[in-house]
Structure formats: C-alpha cells, structure tokens
Image (tube, grey):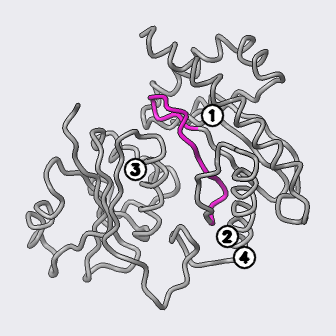
Amino acid sequence: MDKQGYVYILTNPSFKEDWVKIGKSSTSVEQRVKQLDGTAVPLPFEIFATLRTSKYSEVEKVVHQTIDSLTDLRIRQNREFFNITPQEALNILKRLATVLDDAVITEYQTPKKDTCYCNNGSEKQQPRHEKRKAFWTEFIQYCKDNDGLFATNSPVGDNWIGKSIKVPFGISLNVVIGYDFARVEIYFNSGNKDVNKKVFDYLYNHKVEIESDYGSPLLWERLTDKVTCRISDMISFPCFDTNDRSDVFKFIKEASEKMAPIFHNHIIDYKESI
C-alpha cells in the first residue's frame, strides 16, 4: 500500500475568519504546524481539519483547483492561502472523501456557537439551504425505506450529494437539484483535464451500448473548455415548491441504480485497457 499523508486545513488567529491555508504533508500535521510557526505570521497556526489518504498529493491539487474554479479565492496565486471559510474547505474535503477508498477525515475545531451554519457548516443558514436540506432529508429517508443507493448519506445544505461507484479517475455519481429540475450524473473530477477527457471519450465510443443498457438517451457533456466532464439524465420537477416529491425521488433512485453498475463496469474496462 502506498504511504499515506495528509491534506490539511489550517486557520490562524491573526487571519480573517474566512482565510485558510490548505496544503499537504507526508508527516504528521502537528509537525508541519510547528515548521510553519514563525513563518511571517505573528501567531501559531491551528489545525481545523485533515484528510488522511495515500492520494494526498492528488487530493491537495484537486482541492486547490476546485476552489480556483469557483471564483478567484486564492489570496496569492503562488501560495496556499485562500479566501474561503474553513467549513467550506472542509466540505470540499468531505466530497472528495466519498470517492477515495482509504480517506479518513479528522475535525479539530467546531463552528463558533454564535454562528448558525447549515449542516455542512459551509455558510450561514439561508432559505435556499434550508430548502435543500429538507429535500435531501426527505429523499434520504425515501432511500432508507426503499433500499436506495443514498440511504447512508447525510442531508446537506448544498444543491448536490454524491456517491462513490468504486472506480478510479475521480469519477463519482452525483445528484443535483434546482428549483425546477433534478439531475443524476456521472461526474469526472480527477483534477487532470486530459485524464477526464480520455475517460469521457472512451465512454462516448461506447455510447450506443451504454444508452441501450440504461434504457434511454443520456446527455453527454465533454465540457471541452473545462477540466471536468459530465454524463447525465435529468427530469423537470419543482423540487421545492411541492409537498409530493414521490415522482422525483423515484426518478433519482431508478436513474442512479442503473447508472452505477453500467459506468462502474465500463470505467473498470477502460482502466484495464490502458
């Protein structure tokens, strides 16, 4: 087994509340914090959270790229400091952990008691986050009652949840919701654009077979100008403005249960062919 290391989120009492340092270490993070003490900061760094994995270098790169892709949140482009709350950074680590077989997340700090966060702690509670959490709470219970893939997920305030399909290349099965749609997707987010496009192109060459097994056409988005790719199925549905979500829950459950084995098998075939 490859040697494990850490991706860490550090805060500092001398920073603004929404500034963090996100880096990696092949040794203990406590040791790394000691090394950083006195590096032009008046107070010692504090560990907010860590993710331990053998793929720590790849994870650190994907975390940085994910934050950079959202907006210009890096304080200086050649440094590991970001204008993002530690809870938002932790939420990104938790997402990545769902597609890693050996990921262990350790949280060292908790949100301040005078701050009301949504359950993922990523930002202050707002109506849209409450609506999303209520949707996921109901959907996860539906999965528990009907043996769905997402029965073990936790409800969040984000507009998506993910599930590992036990394949490499940073590929996961996601469900995304909006005010008038729900989408089930195979999402390519290895952090390496060339890798994402190569796997996508391989699958696209098997499009007829995949869609035949799935039972209907899929939306194939190579997203040539972006790092990521997406293959999805979608339904129009007022996810928040209804008391009866049985139709959308049934769609998500059935679509995810069909996609997971189909794409797992094809992606494993691709891995064995290279």
Q: Which residue is mark 3?
A: 63
Tag nearer the camera, 1 or 3 = 1
Q: Which residue is mark 2?
A: 129
Name the residue nearer the viewer: 163 or 48: 163
Q: Which residue is mark 1?
A: 186
Tag nearer the camera, 3 or 2 = 2
In the displayed structure, 153 sits above or below 109; it is: above
> Could you tell me if the residues under marks 3 and 2 are in contact, i.e. CB atoms within 8 Å?
no
What residue do we see at 37% from left, 63% from top?
Answer: 82
> Could you tell me if the residues under marks 1 and 3 are in contact, i.e. CB atoms within 8 Å?
no
Q: Is residue 159 magenta?
A: yes
Amino acid type, residue under disc 2 in the picture: His
Give the residues drawn in magenta, as a range. 157-172
Q: Residues within 10 Å of mark 1 (few under 14, many from 20)?
A: many
Find the distance from the CA under tag 1 to the CA under tag 3: 19 Å
Q: Quadrant of residue 101?
A: top left
Amino acid type, residue under disc 3 in the picture: Val
Horizontal and vertical percent for residue 181? 82, 50
Q: Residue furthest top?
A: 273
Mark 2 element type? helix
Amino acid type, residue under disc 4 in the picture: Pro
Question: Residue 127 got which mark?
Answer: 4
Find the distance from the CA under tag 2 to the CA under tag 1: 24 Å
Q: Is residue 148 left or right of residue 14?
A: right
What residue do we see at 47% from left, 35% from top?
Answer: 170
Closer to the N terminus: mark 4 or mark 1? 4
Closer to the N terminus: mark 1 or mark 3? 3
Q: Residues within 10 Å of mark 2 (few under 14, many from 20)?
A: some
Horizontal and vertical percent for residue 62? 40, 44
Q: Is residue 171 left or right of residue 59?
A: right
